[in-house]
Image (tube, rainbow, N blue to C red):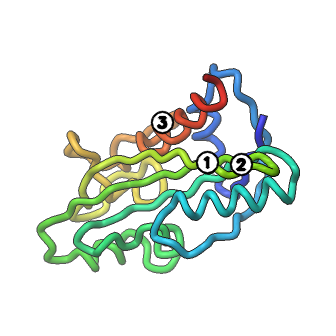
Amino acid sequence: MFVLITGNEEKIREFQLALKGSGIRFDVLRGEKPELRSDEPCEIVKVAAKTFAEKLGKPVVVEDSGLFIEALKGFPGTCTRYIHERIGNNGILKLMKGIKKRRCRYKSAVGYCEAGKEPICFLGTEEGKVAEKERGKGGWGQDPIFIPNGSRMTYGETRKTGDVNKFRREAILKLGQFLNP
């Protein structure tokens, strides 16, 4: 049993779906985690997980994800949420105007820590490209502008209730394998 620290209802649902049937249970503490400024999501979640594990005296899990666009030198990266709240997907698309090479990578880092121990990071990634325009109403965040490799459609066009993005599912399942070997 662990405590998931997040203020994001979608992340709670995705953890529930990804861990369904594993026997792994968790409580949720709704709130925001302190965010270290770093280009590496694993570094961010390790610091946050350690901080909360020591504070609560319980095993803690935090997740941080970001969209890393190669042509923008990794921007918005670990600042994806902040940038999304300020300029949204349309702002990202404006920055990409005229750029032909649209490769990007989603990263999801799941940090786990028990009080008195060192934190661990489980990373999930997914390659893709940035769409030319927003497409679809499904999902959340950058789903309407992210086209995963092997697809011609954005996550916004293909996501349905009950889906978990590949990159986040991968990280959560690594956590599950660690907790339930």
Residue at the location (59% across, 37% down)? 175
How packed mark 3 is, by other alpha carbons closer than 10 Å (few <14, some 14-19, many 20 or more), is some
Q: What residue type is labelled 3?
A: Asp
Q: How many marks?
A: 3
Q: Quadrant of the C terminus?
A: top right
Which callout, 2 or 3, points at the residue further toward the start of the chain? 2
C-alpha span from label 2 to label 3: 27 Å
Q: Please, is residue 84 above or below residue 118 in the view?
A: below
Q: What percent of the width, then of the height, locates residue 132?
A: 21, 64
Kind of residue sitting beneath label 1:
Ile
Is residue 53 positioned above or below 78 on the image?
above
Q: Which residue is drawn at 28% across and 79% down?
A: 95
State which tag comes first along the sequence, 3 or 1: 1
Q: Where is residue 114 in the image (x, y as percent from the top left)?
A: 77, 46
Asked whether the residues under the numbered discs 2 and 3 touch, taking CB atoms below 8 Å apart as contact, a structural biologist would say no
Q: Name the residue under label 3.
A: 163
Q: Report crowding for label 1: few under 14, some 14 to 19, many 20 or more residues within 10 A (C-alpha).
A: many
Distance Cα–Cα, label 3 vs label 1: 26 Å
Q: Which residue is pictured at 55% across the width and 38% down the height? A: 172
Of 30 and 64, which appears nearest the observer? 64
Foreground pick, 134 / 123: 123
Q: In which quarter of the image is the N terminus?
A: top right
**Badge 2 or badge 1: first in the primary sequence:** 2
Q: Is residue 76 above or below residue 108?
A: below
Q: Name the residue under label 2.
A: 113
Contact? badges 3 and 1 (CB < 8 Å)? no
**Residue 106: x %, y % from top left:** 38, 54
Q: Is mark 1 on a helix, strand or loop?
A: strand
Question: Mark 1 — residue?
Answer: 120
Mark 2–mark 1 contact, CB under 8 Å?
A: yes
